[in-house]
């Protein structure tokens, strides 16, 4: 097995995750089996308890791990599922070492931070690679070199290189700023980042030069001299309109060929045709489909942050491009609707509305108003997780006449909790056990014939990923169905409603809706560039109409 470590320099947020996923994609296109691992330097055991505004989206794997959004990029680019062993945090590694020590697995040794923690990291990397039967295991180290938090992970990388010198490569993804007032691309920050990496005992084999523009030969020569690296091993990575162009850009510099040469390997095949066609569609799509996302996790002062809903955004893109449409996504603040009901009229300008997941009661009444507006004005609506729960509350209040309908998450003492906590979760909440205790990962669902959902999937039995604690209260199912709501997806094992929708066909225009579907699960987690999620595809088709 070959190992490629990807570290970052200068600053975070420059695309290490996309770079790692792209390297995986181009190596896979050469006929190799690839897997990818993300290391986060946080003490958190997993990403489930992190604030999405600060950390970005919490992605969920098939086996129920709450992890960093980069794992979602790995799955989308590699078109493969990634599992729990492919995500590490400082907290998770330390917890594992401490549990082993308590179980006498160190045979009475005095357990030290070094080499105890790096050895645990290496063991996890090897286990993940072996489980995936990978030829290449890519390891992205979070943060930037020079930070105290990731020193132990860099030490693990150094130790693995020392043990397997011919099987390990290092890639530094570093930012090359272009100063507006000077107009010159500066290499000094990357020189400093390389020096910091050298201090950890690591020399990069490649530098991926991230910048708003492509790196020129003069800058390459400078980096080559001061970073002790060959000019050909400096890869240009300018800003692109779509992250899906990045593998194509890397191949312009023959990155996969250079990696294989350093490992003394030959490519087994070459297949980027389908991906290349997808990128062409992205570039050539001109006709717009306008989608509004009504959320609350994207406002940070005067800035709008998209990372909180990254999988939703990508799923919209996948579905839109499959219909040769360019998505125009607009962020709509749910709290604005609470302040001013007239502002709901902004929803008329969209072809479709998405109400995504979330936690807590901030902005809830605004989202409910938006759902009511979409229902009454026949605007295609897709609700996700909390979005489904709020669609049930809105329908209960305004169609079923249950005026005080709500969720136990917002008011546990309410009389009509149409959304309520599962029995299995009640003790966990009392004991304040929040981390990793929700309904997580993949669950079965059976679809009802004749529904939008059944038509979209084209089959009866499906599996989808979950991340939630509250469910549709079965005591209200008959009332809801009696007023026209369709329970189109059911988990038979627990008798839980997974999908609700309103009829798209029937007698009387006032009783039908072009697309009103909401899911308790997160379909966005399983959408892929070359295989859009069926519910997102059906939603986009309705929006186009």
Image (spheres, helix red, strand yellow):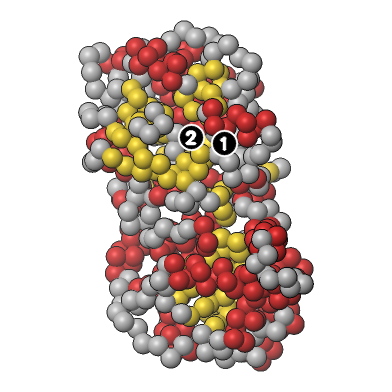
For residue 370, say whether it is visible: no
Q: Which mark is residue 358?
A: 1
- Percent coordinates x, y for residue 298 in the rendering: 61, 42
Q: Is residue 433 above or below residue 71?
A: above
User: Residue 470 or 25: which is nearer the viewer?
Assistant: 470
Q: Which residue is mark 2?
A: 385
SS state under label 2: loop
Q: Earlier in the sequence, mark 1 or mark 2?
A: 1
| Residue 175 image offset from top left, x and y in percent | 64, 71
Q: Place residue 289 in its image quadrant.
A: top left
Local packing at callout 1 (Cα closer than 10 Å; few below 14, some 14-19, many 20+) is: many
Q: Residue at x 48, y 89 (%)?
A: 262
Q: What is the secondary structure assignment of the residue under circle 1?
A: loop
Specify whether residue 63 is in view.
yes
Image x and y of residue 273, in percent: 29, 69
Q: Work out whether 301 lies above or below 40.
A: above
């Amino acid at each position: 097995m070959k190992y490629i470590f990807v570290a970052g320099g200068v600053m975070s947020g420059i695309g290490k995750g996309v770079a790692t996923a792209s390297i995986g994609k181009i190596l896979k296109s050469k006929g190799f089996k690839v897997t990818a691992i993300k290391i986060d330097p946080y003490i958190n055991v997993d990403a489930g308890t992190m604030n999405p505004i600060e950390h970005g989206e919490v992605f969920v794997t098939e086996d129920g791990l709450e992890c960093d959004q980069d794992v979602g990029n790995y799955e989308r680019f590699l078109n493969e599922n990634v599992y729990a062993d492919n995500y590490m945090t400082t907290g998770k590694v330390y917890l594992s070492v401490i549990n082993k020590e308590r179980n006498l697995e160190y045979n009475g040794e005095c357990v030290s931070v070094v080499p105890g923690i790096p050895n645990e990291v290496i063991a996890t990397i090897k286990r993940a690679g072996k489980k995936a039967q990978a030829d290449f295991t890519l390891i992205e180290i979070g943060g930037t070199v020079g930070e105290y938090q990731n020193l132990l992970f860099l030490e693990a990388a150094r130790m693995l290189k020392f043990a397997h010198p011919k099987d390990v490569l290092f890639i530094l993804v570093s930012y090359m700023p272009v100063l507006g007032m000077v107009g010159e691309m500066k290499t000094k920050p990357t020189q400093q980042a390389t020096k910091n990496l050298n201090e950890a005992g690591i020399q990069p084999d490649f530098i991926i030069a991230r910048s708003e523009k492509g790196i020129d030969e003069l800058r390459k020569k400078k980096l080559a001299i001061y970073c002790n690296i060959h000019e050909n091993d400096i890869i240009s990575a300018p800003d692109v309109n779509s992250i899906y162009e990045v593998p194509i850009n890397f191949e312009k510099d023959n990155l996969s060929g250079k990696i294989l040469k350093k490992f003394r390997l030959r490519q087994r095949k070459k297949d980027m045709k389908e991906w290349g066609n997808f990128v062409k569609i992205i570039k050539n799509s001109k006709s717009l489909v306008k989608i509004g996302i009504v959320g609350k996790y994207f406002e940070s002062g005067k800035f709008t942050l998209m990372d909180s809903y990254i999988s939703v955004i990508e799923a919209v893109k996948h579905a839109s491009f499959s219909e040769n449409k360019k998505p125009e996504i607009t962020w709509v603040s749910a709290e604005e609707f609470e302040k001013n009901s007239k502002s709901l009229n902004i929803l008329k300008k969209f072809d479709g509305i998405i109400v995504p997941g979330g936690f807590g009661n901030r902005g809830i009444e605004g989202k409910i108003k938006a759902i009511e507006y979409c229902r009454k004005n026949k605007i295609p609506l897709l609700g996700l997780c909390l979005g489904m729960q709020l669609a049930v509350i809105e329908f209960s209040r305004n169609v079923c006449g249950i005026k005080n309908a709500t969720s136990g998450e917002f008011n546990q003492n309410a009389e009509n909790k149409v959304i309520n906590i599962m029995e299995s979760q009640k003790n966990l909440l009392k004991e304040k056990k929040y981390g990793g205790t929700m309904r997580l990962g993949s669950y079965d669902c059976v679809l009802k014939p004749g529904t939008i959902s059944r038509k979209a999937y084209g089959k009866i039995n499906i599996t989808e990923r979950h991340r939630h604690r509250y469910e549709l209260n079965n005591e209200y199912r008959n009332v809801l169905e009696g007023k026209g709501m369709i329970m189109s997806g059911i988990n038979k094992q627990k008798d839980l409603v997974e999908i609700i929708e309103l009829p798209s066909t029937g007698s009387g225009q006032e009783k039908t809706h072009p697309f009103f579907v909401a899911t308790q699960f997160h379909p966005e987690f399983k959408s892929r560039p070359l295989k859009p999620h069926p519910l997102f595809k059906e939603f986009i088709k309705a929006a186009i109409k």
